[in-house]
Amino acid sequence: MKTATRVIIADDHELARSGLQTMIGSERSIEIVGLASNGREAVSLTRELRPDLVLMDLRMPDLDGLSATRQIKEIDPRIVVIVVTMYENPQYFFEAIQAGAASYLLKDASQTDILRAIRQAMHNETTLSPKLLPHLMRRIAIDGKGLGGGVGRLTEREREVLGLLAQGLSNREIAEKIVVTEGTVKVHVSNIFSKLDVSDRTQAVVRAISLGLILSGVA
């Protein structure tokens, strides 16, 4: 039997917490295990409950969402953090991705969008927003640095798969595109993560941009 995705919702506004709880709580594949009203509570609950995923607001008292995301990823890099914010700000987006967030959603996102983001994240198929990706690329170019960590030599096939990841394709779509099995794609993706020293697709794409492996969303 498939285990439900265990989720913590962190937002300092009760109405926002309740809204997200209502939107996703009825899904059988999701179990809401905790609610936090600030970043410090989110970190504490994460340490105690070890959820699969945290929906994280950015602007919160006591400890902001960016700092909380960093601490959560230190607790366990496998825990997925999805930022849900009202700020469509490239700077916040850049900082959230640097902190380790896998996705960046606006609070006016539909129930379908939020559930899709959760499912993609739990299947390690999270991708960067095409709308915000150019801002991220420009910022990395200006800073002249990426997310840190070691890098190994990618094979030609791995570079191809990486480029398709940046385009938002799922493992199945990539498999169809390059005419291999989905299992083979999963192996390539795992190798890419290892060589780029990252733990998810979002960080792989960002790391690849910083290294010049992706110039315009295509390897």
Image (spheres, rainbow, N blue to C red):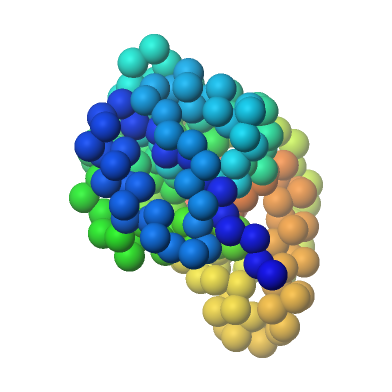
Say if residue 104 shows up in the picture: yes
47, 214: nearer the viewer: 47
Residue 157, quarter of picture: bottom right
Residue 165: image x %, image y %? Answer: 55, 63
Along the horizontal axis of the image, is 121 left or right of 48?
Answer: left
Measured along the vertical axis of the image, is residue 185 above or below residue 9?
A: below
Say if residue 211 shows up in the picture: no
Measured along the vertical axis of the image, is residue 194 above or below residue 123?
A: above
> On the rendered image, what quadrant is the C terminus found in?
bottom right
Residue 65: image x %, image y %? Answer: 41, 27
126, 21: nearer the viewer: 21
Along the horizontal axis of the image, is 149 left or right of 101?
Answer: right
Residue at (54, 36) in percent of width and height: 100
Residue 19: image x %, image y %? Answer: 27, 46
Residue at (52, 42) in percent of width and height: 33
Residue at (42, 29) in percent of width and height: 36
Name of the residue lying farthest toward the top: 62
> On the rendered image, what quadrant is the N terminus found in?
bottom right
Number of numbered callouts drawn: 0
Residue 131, quarter of picture: bottom left
Residue at (58, 31) in percent of width and height: 46
Residue 108: image x %, image y %? Answer: 21, 50
106, 28: nearer the viewer: 28
187, 147: nearer the viewer: 187
Measured along the vertical axis of the image, is residue 19 above or below residue 40?
A: below
